[in-house]
Image (tube, coloured by chain):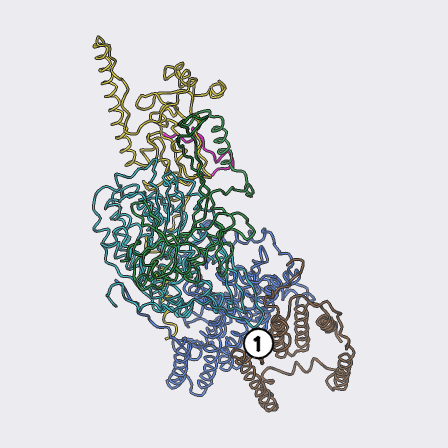
Chain colours: A green, B yellow, C blue, D brown, E cyan
Amino acid sequence: MMESLEALVSRMASVLPAIDVSLVPNEAPGGPSSLRVAPQDGRRAAEFFKSDPGLRLDYLSNLTGVDWPDRVTKQKVKSKRLVDGVEKEVEETLETRTPGFLEVVYHLYSIELKHGPLIFRMRTADRMAGVHLPSMTPVWRGAEFQEREVFDLYGVRFDSHPDLRRLLMWETFEDHPMRKDYVEPNDYEYEPTAHDEVLAKIKERDSSGVSGTA
Amino acid sequence: MLGTGLIKGMAETARNFVGSFLEEDRLTTVEYPEERIPAKEAARSFPFLVFDGDDAEKGLRCVACQICEKECPPQCIFILKDTAKKPDFVGKMQFQPKVFDIDVSVCMSCQICVEVCPFEAIKMDVDFELSRFDRFEGLLIHKDELSKPNSYFRKIHPTDAAAVDANLAAEKAKAEAKAVADAAAKAKAASAAAAGLAAPAKPAAAAPPPPPTPADPILKSASSSTAGPGLAETGSGKTHAPAHGS
Amino acid sequence: MIEWADQIFVLLKREILLLVPVALQPLASILLSVGPIMGVFATLFAATTVLERKGLGRIQNRLGPNRVGPFGLLQPLADGIKAIIKEDVVPYRTDRVLHTLAPILIMVAALLAYSVLPLGRNMVALDLDAGVLFFFAAGATTELAIFMAGWSSRNKYALLGAMRAIAQMISYEIPLILSTVGVLMAAGTLSTTGIVEAQSGYSGLFPNWYVLTPWGFAGFFLFLIAATAEANRSPFDLPEGESELVAGYFTEYSGFKFAMFFFGEYLGLFAANALAITLFLGGWNAPLQILDWVPSYLWFFAKLLFLIGLSIWVRGTTPRLRADQLMNFAWKFMLPMSLVNILASGLWRFTGDGVLGWLVCGSLVAGSYYALGLNLAPKNAVTKRIYRFAT
Amino acid sequence: MSFDLAILALLIGVSAIAAITLRDLVHCVLCLAVTFASLAAVYLRLGAEFLAFSQVLVYVGAVAILALFVVLLTRTGEPRAESRFSPQVMIPLAVCAFVFTGLAAAAWSSSLKDSPEAVGASMKLKDVGRELMTSYVLPLEVLGLLLTAALIGAAILAKADDGEDDEVTDLGESQGQQQRPMVATTHSDPKHD
Amino acid sequence: MSSSNLQLEAPLDPAFKVERRTATGRGDLLEVSMGPQHPSTHGVFRMDVVLDGERVTKLKPVFGYLHRNHEKIAENTTYLGSMPYTDRLDYFCSLTNNWAYALTVEKLAGLQPPERAEYIRVITAEFTRLQNHVCLIGFLLQDMGASGTPLMYAFREREAILDLFESLTGARMMCNYMRFGGCRVDLPSGWLDQASKVVDRFPRFLDEFDRLISGNEILAARTQGVGVLPRELAVSASVTGPVLRASGVNYDIRKVDKYGIYDRFSFRVPLGDHGDVYDRYMVRVLEMHESLAILKSALRDIPPGPIMDPKAKLRSFKPKAGEAYGRIESAKGELGFYVISDGSANPYRYRVRPPSLINLTVLEDMCVGHTVADAVIILGSIDIVLGEVDR
């Protein structure tokens, strides 16, 4: 069996100098926790995972993107403050803005040692400009299509990917459909169907609130 | 030697050629329109609405709770609630769907509507010959066409129907017992009114909780105005438009 | 009476000719020969399509066509009507002249071959001195038609298919012709009727067919294989291999032109099989002396149907070869085998059909078959593999 | 000269001229095939069955196809837009005229020119074979040897193509195509592409 | 036959570097776009092939013709609502797709299906594997041009299995059978007997197939040594399933993860030594034998009992926030689902790890240097379903 993630993090810190690795807990009862690796250390960490004799994670099972858009969490804070010279308890809403990012998750297994999974993830700097991550295709060839898919659907650019093109959407397509803020363009070449009427009726009903759904 | 594998293969095809005339199980083809495989009991093709008794309007089990509409993955169901309540199979006052449309062209026969329905009101049909001549309106199946009697359900899915019937009968018996008990309790409460405490006559919910009824004053008044079930039926039978207009 | 039944068509033609003015008699004679040939073989084509589909269906445990007419027998009629009324789609930028000419040429070439085939006693349209040569010359023209079809379509699959088809037909033409040499040597003539007549008569119970000699047997199969390849039939149907080249050289054909290709291809198959019958299976001769009373043309068509059935059977069984393997088979097996076969037939002439002849020629043919078969296997050998299991 | 021979002669002439003047090389080769076939018809008309069928088998069935292959394998897309005639058109014309005159003179002076039908009629296939194997056995064998040598040579050339040695094959036009790795074999129209 | 567990093969070469194979053509290169309407790309798949003569020098797969963004749809649907959509991923194996998704969500929500449900899952999954492999070898031979005979035999057997599925789940292909924490309905009465009958009858088909085609010279010539996939490349490129095992890597998730109740069955994992198309074909044939063994014992041992985890909720199912990755050995390889929950009724992130798509990574490496005809059968031997590739 593989060592615990905590042990792995400390070992990585000792073996690989100045590596930025941290643990990301997972609350699901069946799922293991994962490691977060800083993008600049991604290749080093990957090479380590693959070649370390205790790990030998030679098989990249799954590679996928996750979109975490900007989040605004509102928090009501009560604080005591001097208002007009009198100390009063004032309630105010604090808006904490968590900047969004794109995340790429890697599931690694070892065919050699038959263990796994080790999950590690990398996050981009933001969702628009700094969407670069190191490509894992030179380490695991199996990343080739999956990275292309993430590039296609999320817009993460993988540096030093040998053939970074769109995988599923067509070449001239512009947006990245799996992002949470993707708006479907109204450019389908569809024929009218009876279903359009149904959807229109639903819309009409919901907007007018005729029956008031339960 | 060259050719032995080929000759072996040719012997096998010859065996199958002859076998297709002699052995029944080799020939799986069914000459469809003339010859039909009897439908499997579990088979499913397209949903239908079950009604009890003979009258599709009266006995419809559906209470327009719209759970199926929400759960339907391709969103092919459209329901519009009626404005009047009518007694359902247990005798409880319930809403009925005024409009219940399913789009055949979108439905993917997944049976999720059947599973999520708490009232055993929607079931899967086995009739797969659903082609229509009209591409638009024809593919939208309306309530009158969707409603099929319970006897039909018993015919196509006997095991399932027996279980459902037993379940419903038990529920009904429970509800009746409850009603009797409630009545008794009410009577008792009335007789014991001296204390001035009215026993809470709220009937306990049956196993699947019915959806909360909307507290719309217009609807309330409408349902109160059509007191008798017979009246309600005539009211909802053909006069949709005025009901809607009001 | 027997004689009369056998010669009924010959007599009929003669009677009709007598009704025609003398000046028009040559023309009428041509028409009376060509018309029935086209009619009979078009019917045979129709019958074969339904036979093939039903036969393949049964081989594959299906029913085959069963909707049109009783037992689906009118299926070819429906197919024909469909082919005729379908739109003739000619892609933009095709070479229209060649595109239209190709199916016509392929039909003409296929039909020309029928003029030298003896369909029964005294039933040959054109009894040429060099009949067999004429047959091959007519067959060679189809290559040109296929090339025209593939090239004029301006389609890469069509072009690849045409190239494959031509390469295949040129390669297999050599063993095809060489495998007939033994027969020509034995019969001493190139005339098709002469060859059939040379096979008439019986020695003991068996007829004097060339297929019943060791070299004739090998030659018959060599000829059949080569003819299958010439007709682009499975397992040599690479030029139109639908899994690779969509439909090969007639990818861009539709409607009636497609039907003409289809027809031409089957005509080619019938012609090749008919020549195989003429050369090796005794033509119109009955297999047993006591069956001699059956009209000769019936024997011919019975044999033809048998060979058609064989080709359907093979088609239902085999996968397709690859282009290079096809070429290997032609040049490394078929060619040397047919050369050896010529040697064997030459030896047969000296040894006679006694035990010695059977021994010498038979061992020569069988030995070279075995050796060439071994040689054909790829270097890493077609072997039974042992598989490991993890538990 | 009879009427049918005249038609065939006309066909030969027209298709031969078409074969050298048409723009599309494939059309040229097909016209050449028509020439061969009409020539075969002339032989047939003159009663030389064997020669006619051999002509079809060899020239239409093999030589024309070979020419087509060569055209397909070496040609680059569009037919060239230059003039139909090369500047040195006179030289081949002169050669042609010379050959034609020679042949015509030979034919004219031949003793057979008055009875063309008689030649073919007397020659049965058996006789052709016998003549080949007796009077003309030496030329036949020499021809056979020559063809065998050619065949072996072709095989050796083709074999070298498989190996490392590129110089054998990369001659002529194919060098020009090295710069264009992607060449559509069908006609490529700049507008359409 | 070795019996040592899981350490069958020599260790993988750690120094292995993936190199892209390229072949340079010297003549004219012909660029052919095979697909999306090409008959043998198993759906709407396209391969941009650059050919030197008939040799493939470059091959780029092009996807997306069937792309409907299944993952996005699932993120906008409830957990349960995605279940019928998983049927449509690999539409041959809807039951294993169901299982993989159910397994993942069970991990996410901490559900445990009862024993009977686990048995039913194993039984249906192994039947799914049988019918998938049967069809695959049928399709593979169809790609080789076998005129449909093997395919029809395969479909004959598949019919029996689909009948079983229909009588259990109500649908032949889009089963939508498994639920989080169990299965939708219990086995109908008599189903187990019927299933045993199918299992008992199946070896007859395997033997028949063996006689029909396994010894065929053409099959051997077409597949042996074609499309060789080296072990190291297979592992590096995340190839899974029978394709990986045909390359000699012992990795079967049923053995490694022992998901469900696979640790209760004894079965063997066939491994190939050559990694060519023939090995991929044979590994699947042998896997069918092993599946039959599993089925036999599962049908014998299946206990009575409930089929749903009582904790499981059908309506308003909202797992707690977290993530889970579940994977099973589907007939095509490792089918994984990765689900992130944010506590709402819809998954926040829903990802399918499609074995078909990832196995195609090595398509070019396997095809370069072979002919077009080989490319077609190499593609066929990978076993892709476009519903899963494009999602």
Picture mark count: 1
Q: Nearer the viewer, residue C307 or C286?
A: C307
Quadrant for the C terminus of chain C, please: bottom left
Residue at the spot 41% in from the left edge and 64% down from the top edge: C317
Q: Report whether residue E182 is seen.
A: no
Q: Amino acid at mark 1?
A: Leu
Give the left or right position of residue A16, taking residue C140 as reference.
left
Q: Position of residue A208 (x, y in %)?
A: 49, 26
Residue bearing the label numbered 1: C133
Q: Position of residue E204 (x, y in %)?
A: 29, 59
Query: Which chain does the residue under circle 1 lie in?
Result: C
Eyeballing the image, is D54 above or below E299?
Answer: below
Q: Given the current orientation, which residue lies at the most extreme top position? A: B194
Magenta span has A77? no
Q: Nearer the viewer, residue C299 or D83?
A: D83
Magenta span has B135? yes
Give the left or right position of residue D25, taking residue E78 as reference.
right
Q: Report whether residue E75 is seen.
A: yes
Eyeballing the image, is B243 above or below B6?
Answer: above
Q: Position of residue B232 (x, y in %)?
A: 40, 18
Name the quadrant containing residue D129.
Answer: bottom right
Name the quadrant containing residue C150.
Answer: bottom right
**What range is drawn magenta here?**
B129-148
Name the quadrant containing residue C16.
Answer: bottom right
Q: Nearer the viewer, residue C256 or A59?
A: A59
Q: Given the current orientation, which residue lies at the most extreme front position? A: A85
Q: Nearer the viewer, residue E323 or E75?
A: E323
Q: Position of residue E17 (x, y in %)?
A: 42, 68
How packed is label 1: few (under 14 Cα within 10 Å), some, or many (20 or more)? Answer: many
